[in-house]
Image (cartoon, rainbow, N blue to C red):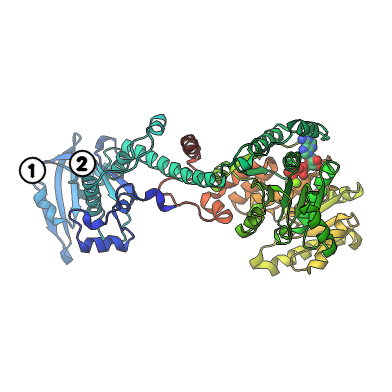
Amino acid sequence: MAVMYEAIIPAKPIETLKGVGPKVAEKLKSIGIDNVNDIIFHLPDSYENLSVMNLAEAENNDKVTVSGTVRTAPALAYFRGGKNRLTVFMEIDGMHVKVIFFNQPYLKDKLPVGSTVRLSGKFHRHKLEINGQRLIYESAGGFRLKYAMGRVMHSKTFNKIVAEVFNTYSFNYDLPEAVRHKYKLLSLREAVRLIHFPASQHDINEARRTIKFYELYTFQLQLLERRNKERVRNERYVIDYDAARLKSFISTLPFELTDDQKKSANEICRDLKQNVSMHRLLQGDVGSGKTIVAGIAAFSVKTIGEQTALMVPTEVLANQHYQSFTETFGGLLNIRKLTGNTTKKQKLEIAASLANGEIDLIIGTHALIEADVLFDKLSLIITDEQHRFGVGHRRKLNDKAYRKNVLYMTATPIPRTLSITTFGDMDVSIIREMPKGRKPVLTYWKKEDEVNEVLGQVADEVQQGRSSYIVAPLIEESETLDLKNVQEIHGMFIDYFGEEKVELVHGRMKPSEKEAGMGRFERLEKPILVSTTVIEVGINVPNATFMVIFNAERFGLSTLHQLRGRVGRSGLQSTCILVSDPKTDNAKQRIDIMTKVTDGFELSEQDLEMRGPGDYFGVRQSGLPQFKLADLSEDYRMLEHARMSAFELSN
Ligand code: ADP
Ligand code: MG
């Protein structure tokens, strides 16, 4: 993503500048400055304001920059070891001030009586004394700039080289006039010039604003370029589905679609009808009703006799999707499942029905990309939690497409800025609203010494025939330590409820043991499951209405949200108890937020705010652009403006 700082001016070597010989060039190259573009985009790190203030307004011990008239001849005194002190009386802003410079004897000649000079130093108000730091000769600007120069040269010298670039070259590029006008931006040249040669704080602010906008705009242009590459325009991509049939299909659904479902379905259907290949992300929290929307898309494709494939990363997810799709669309779509567990015989039969077009929707794992799985006309590809697939896997499935329309689904809510940033090359549909009648999970915070109360609540659930999840933290580096926790907690529940009610599942068990344990819980043979976070996506027990998370402070907001999503999967009211004695304010705040916020998107925004973009982005996505000034968490409004501008101009 470096391209935004390149070729703004002709990419000439730095030696082409007046005053830059091989030696200076060598030094600059040693800190990564290779051509003249690198020079102008090597921005100052900080500005020291040297403009003059009124000393009458300064407080005791303030660092001041003032201007005044020399009233007495400077007196120089030497001490032991060559140290010395220069004393001079000056009239500054109507006050008679004693100014002292330590160990700068050469200033003696710079302070003739009657002259007016500018200086900076520390003001001792009660003594009317300034401990002078230096005399200021800079005439222009009133700012002293600091560049990160790795000790190869002074900031001032570098600033002169920057000036030389402006004297020698003109800019090749600027933001479009319309964009500059709309957001009242400087020209790029003016902005870059002012950031190196500001005359006021206002100059610095405006220059920064323009450069940030430029960075975000260029970034968005790059993403849109990628998007447009994906969205190939070809008559072939038109799926002229039967709208009347689709409408009556939707009317047979057992419920009214939410507005967000309608909007998303419309967006997808519009994509299908267009002569461009679809490249869209469908985002929505667990339970928001993505399955229905995906089903509508699959049905549209079926009305012209073509096929849909849904690829998911795990066997468990494949089973779950297969179950929910057949429940909702069983009579209306011919749906089959293909995974690593499918028998050879079944697989042959499925392959045949895929090849002759009998199957409308195939749901499966990587098994779908195998070479012997051939479609009649695969015209819609849906992937769930696509970030868990390699690019290679996706491409292999895409290669089987008759018409390449791709819909990505994700249940991981992410902040809007991040969405624009990481999925900026896709069109995005968001289901934010939950179906009517859904009861948000009530979430409470309990201290560790209130655990008995919590046990009592679990007992009430058991009494009513409901299931409970009990979660203990597990972090890999300290597995032994935490494993003891799971076992301790397991022991505590066994003491209270007896072996026959409590199941244990953790990451150190054999997969077969784990599955057996989960199975007993899923079949309601045991009402309590004590586990580590291994119960992430995949498990679905609508009867489970209670969750206890121990040491909740050790989980991030998004993990807590994912965990909590295991309950609240039926019409019954569910509850989540966070057991925690948080030690830091940050942890306290997280627990507190969890008790108040149930919307996954809002949580993700708060998560981003609390953690800062570096951390948040770091764990989720690498390869984010390194901007020099823009900051994705602070400048999200500007990011949206930049995106809109880029969109308008590239469409
Ligand atoms: P997701 O895939 O987004 O996690 P699902 O599509 O599996 O969510 O939907 C969760 C549950 O909500 C399903 O039981 C589904 O039948 C139901 N559902 C979906 N949309 C609606 C709606 N508009 N009104 C009522 N219930 C709905
Ligand atoms: Mg689903």
Which labelled disc corresponds to residue 140? Answer: 2
* Residue neighbourhood size for the residue with mark 2, other residues' Cα within 10 Å, grouped as few (<14), some (14–19), many (≥20): few
The local crowd at label 1, few if under 14, some if 14 to 19, many if 20 or more residues have their Cα within 10 Å, is some
Q: Amino acid at mark 2?
A: Ala
Instruction: Judge by depth and name the residue closer to the eye, 382 or 599.
Output: 382
Residue tagged 1: 113
Side of 621 where 496 appears, left or right = right
What is the quadrant of residue 394 in the picture? bottom right
In the rendered image, residue 458, in percent from the top left (x then y), is placed at 84, 51
The residue located at (24%, 61%) in the rendering is: 25
644 in relation to 229, above or below: above
- Tell me what residue is drawn at x 60 percent, y 39 percent: 275
Instruction: Please say whether residue 493 is visible from this viewpoint.
Output: no
Q: Position of residue 384 (x, y in %)?
A: 69, 50
Question: Type of residue at label 1?
Answer: Val
Q: Is residue 27 visible?
A: yes
Q: Position of residue 256 (x, y in %)?
A: 78, 31
| Cα–Cα span, label 2 and label 1 | 24 Å
Q: Evaluate if marks 2 and 1 touch, with contact meaning CB atoms under 8 Å apart.
A: no
Instruction: Classify mark 2: helix, strand or loop.
Output: loop
Between marks 2 and 1 in the image, the one whose residue lies nearer the viewer: 2
- Which image quarter: residue 319? bottom right
* Location of residue 230 with respect to 247 vertically, above or below: below
User: Which numbered dot is residue 224?
Assistant: none
Instruction: State yes or no: Cβ of the residue under disc 1 lies below 8 Å from any atom of ligand 1.
Output: no
Q: How many numbered marks does the figure carry?
A: 2
Q: Residue at x 71, y 33 (%)?
A: 262
